[in-house]
Amino acid sequence: MDRRFVAEEWKALTVSDQVMRCNTMAQEAIKLANDAPPNLAEGYLFLAEQWLRLGMEIGRQDSSVSVNA
């Protein structure tokens, strides 16, 4: 997965793909937190939580999208 974040590309994704990317970004942040010193782990976990919340909000736009991570 290309991890660049380009707004125009994001807007072109389907709702389902946006949710999937949010979940992927959350999973990657959790992986980073697991290997980070405590002062950084907290930040990575915060980012993971925010990606998951964003994915859930985006998924609410389309009831056919599964928002589970």
Image (cartoon, rainbow, N blue to C red):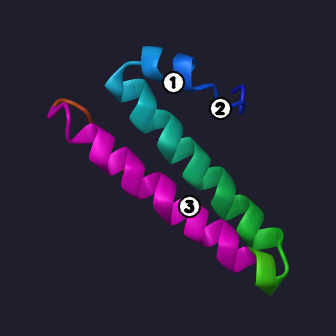
- Are the two marked residues, 3 and 2, in contact with CB atoms closer than 8 angstroms? no
Q: Earlier in the sequence, mark 1 or mark 2?
A: 2
Pick the quarter of the image with the N terminus. Answer: top right
Q: Amino acid at mark 1?
A: Trp
Q: In this picture, which residue range is highlighted in magenta?
A: 41-63
Return the mark for residue 5: 2
Q: Amino acid at mark 3?
A: Ala
So how many labels did they put on this image? Answer: 3
Residue shown at 14% from the left, 34% from the top: 63
**Label 2, residues with CA under 10 Å away: few <14, some 14-19, many ≥20:** few
Front of the two marks 3 and 1: 1
**Of pointers 3 and 1, the one earlier in the residue sequence:** 1
The residue tagged 1 is 10
Report if the CB atoms under discs 1 and 2 are less than 8 Å apart.
yes
Query: Is residue 18 positioned above or below 8 on the image?
Result: below
Q: Amino acid at mark 2?
A: Phe
Neighbourhood count class around disc 3 (C-alpha, 10 Å): few under 14, some 14–19, many 20 upward:
many
Which residue is depicted at the point 37% across and 19% down?
Answer: 14
State the image coordinates of residue 13 (x, y, percent, origin top left): 44, 18
Residue linked to disc 3 = 48
